Amino acid sequence: MKTSEIEHTTFVIERELPGSPRHAFRFWAEPKLKERWTGCHPDWTVLHEQFDFRAGGSEAKRWRTSEGDEQTFNAFYLDVAPGQRIIYAYEMSFRGARVSASLVTIELTPSGAQTHMKFTEQAVFLGGGGTRQQRVMGTEEGFDRLIREIAEETSDAK
């Protein structure tokens, strides 16, 4: 692979999440809650999934797209401080070729009755083709779903 086909980038996304940092944290830590906001391709078939959310743990998922291609996500949790932060490294592949590798830090801090979330991703995209823009847009869409899911869970608890 040529060096010109490698793109290094960092982006930050901030959101106000409903409820306390401990409540928001559950949406990363509990598999069923996480799936509610990260499961964005209902037409894809899950071929393998594994979830061990703790420092030193890992997460993996492999899908078959509706077109028949395979995509993978493999993460390693470096630091997990409940209700405060999550640091993990992950890589994604498509059709057997790695397309990106990233380091992510999620910070959760109280903000009145809400939680301020700061998501920082340092990414290396392999192969070019506008992948940074796609990743930022997809991540923002995921966080919009996260806000809706937390709000729904919070209103159901009342």
Image (cartoon, rainbow, N blue to C red):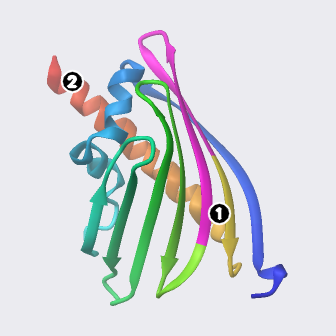
Q: Position of residue 94 (x, y in %)?
A: 49, 81
Task: Look at the picture and state if 122 lies above or below 25.
Answer: below
Residue span colored magenta: 100-120
Q: CA distance from mark 1 to mark 2?
A: 33 Å
Q: Nearer the viewer, residue 77 or 151?
A: 77
Relative side of 59 to 124, left or right? left
Q: Is residue 31 magenta?
A: no
The majority secondary structure of the magenta stretch comes to strand
Residue extending farthest front: 56
Q: Position of residue 121 (x, y in %)?
A: 63, 49
The residue shown at (26%, 41%) is 30
Q: Which residue has dot 2 on it?
A: 155
How packed mark 1 is, by other alpha carbons closer than 10 Å (few <14, some 14-19, many 20 or more), is few
Q: Which residue has dot 1 on it?
A: 133
Q: Position of residue 111 (x, y in %)?
A: 51, 14
The residue shown at (37%, 46%) is 145
Q: Nearer the viewer, residue 88 or 117?
A: 88
Task: Look at the picture and state if 123 lies above or below 118.
Answer: below
Residue type at the position of mark 2: Ser
Residue type at the position of mark 1: Gln
How packed mark 2 is, by other alpha carbons closer than 10 Å (few <14, some 14-19, many 20 or more), is few
Rendered-image quadrant of the N terminus: bottom right
